[in-house]
Each structure stands twice: as structure tokens, then as C-alpha cells.
Image: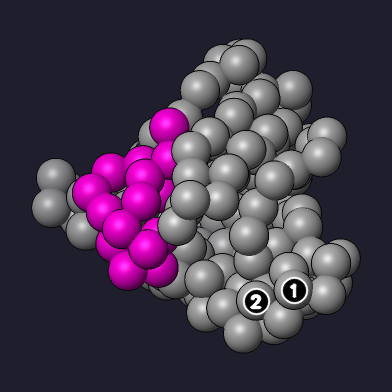
Amino acid sequence: MAREQYEVEIMASPEKVFAHLDDINNVGGHMSEKSSMPMMGSRLKLEVIDDKKGVGATYRWKGSVMGMTVDIQETVTKWVRDGEKTWQTIGKPKMIVMSGYTMHLSLTGTDKGTRVVFEIDYSLPKTPWGWIIGKLLARRYAKWCLQRACEDAKRTLESTA
């Protein structure tokens, strides 16, 4: 397993930051909105399978990137209101640069707002070709995802403060 981490301080309360980042549309929006280079100009469609708050909430990302199928299901495995959330891939995800992952958000109140630590632990694909692609691109893609989610939240929450 490899790990990437991104930290940011957001000038908003932990309650507001958590509410924003607990919404999969916000934390994963960079994969479904406008096209981007890390997504090779593609977008994924988000399906909320179980939209309950907390443990058991389940999501599915589906689409294609460069003609290759992407089909990922995730479920929340840990949820502490206003403080912590963990979710991971389930089943047999079809991804290009990773074979599976666990994402973890941790929030801590500060004098000025909220410190956010966002992490991903991921495995490279098992096939020889997938492993090579993953070795070349997974780390950059993971960093981009974490940074986009955090900086998008910072921009949104601080502009409405």
C-alpha cells in the first residue's frame, strides 16, 4: 500500500467543514464536473446507492477514461460527526491507476478554523501493464484528488464566511 496526504487549514468551523466534506458531491466533484488533465478529459458519473449519513453510506463512480471502463463502489466504514470519516472501495473496482483505496478525513478545530488532514492509502493494479501505469501515475493522481477536494472546500467555505 502507498499513502499520500494533504493538509490545509480552512477558516470555518469544524461543523461547517465536516458537513461540506461529508457530501460526496463536494469531496468527489473534481471527478464528475468539468474535464481535466488528470482525468484525461473524462468525467465520471456519481450514483449514490445508499445516502444515509455515516457508516454504510455507499457510492458508485462509473464512466470511462481513454476508452477504459472505470467502475468503483465505495462505502463509509468510519464516521465521527464533525471530526472523522473513512471510506474505501468495495467489491472488484475497475480502475486504471489503482486497484483499490481507503480514504480518511480528519478534522481538528484551531484558533482560526479547522485543520483538515486528507489521506489515501492505495494499491497498484495487479496486472503487469496496470502496475506500470499505476507506478507512473497513481501518486500524482492521488495527490491531485486530495488537493482538489481540500482546496475546493477551502475556496467554497471561505468565500461564504
Mark 2 — residue? Answer: 133
Label 1: state its secondary structure.
helix
Query: In the rendered image of this protein, does residue 138 appear above or below residue 109?
Result: below
Q: In this view, does 40 lie to the left or right of 36?
A: right
Q: Is the magenta stretch mostly helix, strand or loop?
A: loop
Query: In the rendered image of this protein, does residue 94 appear above or below residue 22?
Result: below
Label 2: state its secondary structure.
helix
Q: What stretch is highlighted in magenta?
A: 31-45
Q: Where is residue 6 in the image (x, y as percent from the top left)?
A: 52, 74
Q: What residue type is labelled 1?
A: Trp
- Name the residue: 46% across, 30% down: 46
- Name the residue: 35% across, 51% down: 42
| Residues at circles 1 and 2 in contact by the CB criterion of under 8 Å | yes
Residue 79 visible within the image: no
Q: Is residue 78 left or right of residue 134?
A: right
Q: Where is residue 67 in the image (x, y as percent from the top left)?
A: 48, 51
- Name the residue: 40% across, 60% down: 39
Q: Where is residue 10 in the image (x, y as percent from the top left)?
A: 34, 62
Q: In this view, does 34 lie to the left or right of 77?
A: left
Snapshot colouring: one colour
Q: What residue type is labelled 2?
A: Ile
- Name the residue: 43% across, 32% down: 45
Quick one: label 1, few (<14), some, or many (20+) residues within 10 Å?
A: few
| Marking on residue 95 | none
Residue 135 visible within the image: yes
| Marking on residue 129 | 1
Q: Quadrant of residue 85?
A: top right
From the viewer's side, name the closer residue of 118 and 31: 31
Quick one: label 2, few (<14), some, or many (20+) residues within 10 Å?
A: some
